[in-house]
């Protein structure tokens, strides 16, 4: 089972237990040396098992574990196991054979940090630059992914505006009840929309996610609106 960030939940639990042991605690209480050693041994065994499973799962699984493990937790692994994890995780880059895909739409370059193809030429929405990325797409899928979202680029501003209005309709009450400046009073849906600045558009196989800077509506978090392949909004979330 995978937890947030792609790291197995079993490994997260083992790391949490080891972190408590380092502080001399078990379950929030001070523990004896014998108890600490017992929990440490069990947690280390669980961590090793989870790492081996991630290695067997391939580059993506190994990479998620390597990226998610804090340095102190990595240092507890045997050097041979850590070396295997790093080697398999390193295959993530090599399994992407084409670094640049060139299309009439623009050139898409593979970005290791995003694990996505990113258009070298940002989109423009109302004079604002918006990054276009293709999530979880192989080089042979880039052109097909763009064709699946036929509203790009001609209806881009329309879709972004629709996503803004959807976020305002769904999120205005939450803003007023939990984040609004009491002295300033509640804002209108129009003011809510005006404070959302589009920054990133990610195209998935059958959906698109538009990320907005929240203009401090939710104290610096990002607002993301998920749309279907026609550009119609489906849901919104606060992230970051």
Image: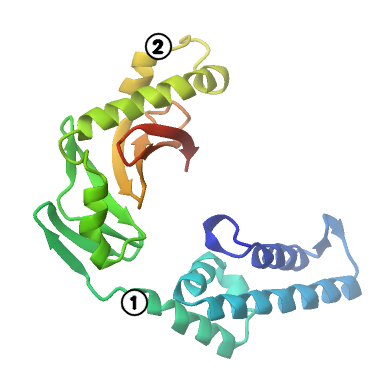
Q: Where is residue 29 in the image (x, y as percent from the top left)?
A: 86, 56
- Distance (Cα) linking label 1 and label 2: 49 Å
Task: Give the label on residue 138, or none.
Answer: none
Q: How many marks?
A: 2
Q: Residue at x 59, y 61 (%)?
A: 2
Q: In which quarter of the image is residue 1?
A: bottom right
Element under disc 1 = loop
Q: Earlier in the sequence, mark 1 or mark 2?
A: 1
Residue topped by disc 2? 188
For label 2, the crowd category at 10 Å Cα-Cα, with few meaning under 14, some 14 to 19 and many 20 or more, is few
Q: Where is residue 175 in the image (x, y as percent from the top left)?
A: 50, 22
Element under disc 2 = loop
Instruction: Left or right? Give the position of 143 relative to 13.
Output: left
Q: Residue at x 12, y 54 (%)?
A: 106
Q: Position of residue 219 (x, y in %)?
A: 47, 31
For label 1, the crowd category at 10 Å Cα-Cα, with few meaning under 14, some 14 to 19 and many 20 or more, is few
Instruction: Left or right? Give the position of 163 relative to 24.
Output: left
Residue pushed farthest left? Answer: 104
Against 93, residue 187 (above or below) is: above
Against 18, residue 216 (above or below) is: above
Residue topped by disc 1? 95
What coloring was used for the rendering? rainbow
Against 27, residue 232 (above or below) is: above
Q: Quadrant of residue 195?
A: top left
Q: Which residue is drawn at 23% across and 42% down?
A: 130
Q: Residue at x 51, y 71 (%)?
A: 61
């Amino acid at each position: 089972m995978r937890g947030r960030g792609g790291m197995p939940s079993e490994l997260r639990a083992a790391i949490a237990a080891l972190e408590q042991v380092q502080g001399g605690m078990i379950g929030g209480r001070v523990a004896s040396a014998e108890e600490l050693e017992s929990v440490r041994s069990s947690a280390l065994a669980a961590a090793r098992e989870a790492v081996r499973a991630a290695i067997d799962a391939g580059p993506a699984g190994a990479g998620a574990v390597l990226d998610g493990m804090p340095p102190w937790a990595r240092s507890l692994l045997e050097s041979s196991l850590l070396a295997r994890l790093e080697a398999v995780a390193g295959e993530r880059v090599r399994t992407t054979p084409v670094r640049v895909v060139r299309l009439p739409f623009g050139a898409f370059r593979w970005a290791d940090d995003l694990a996505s193809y990113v258009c070298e030429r940002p989109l423009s929405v109302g004079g604002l630059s918006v990054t276009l990325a293709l999530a979880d797409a192989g080089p042979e899928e880039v052109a097909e992914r763009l064709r699946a979202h036929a509203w790009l680029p001609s209806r881009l501003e329309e879709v972004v505006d629709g996503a803004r209005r959807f976020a305002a309709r769904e999120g205005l009450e939450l803003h007023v009840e939990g984040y609004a400046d009491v002295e300033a009073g509640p804002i209108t849906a129009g003011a809510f929309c005006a404070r959302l600045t589009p920054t990133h558009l990610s195209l998935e196989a059958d959906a698109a996610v538009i990320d907005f800077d929240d203009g401090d509506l939710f104290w610096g978090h990002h607002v993301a609106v998920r749309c279907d392949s026609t550009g119609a909004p489906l849901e919104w979330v606060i992230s970051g």
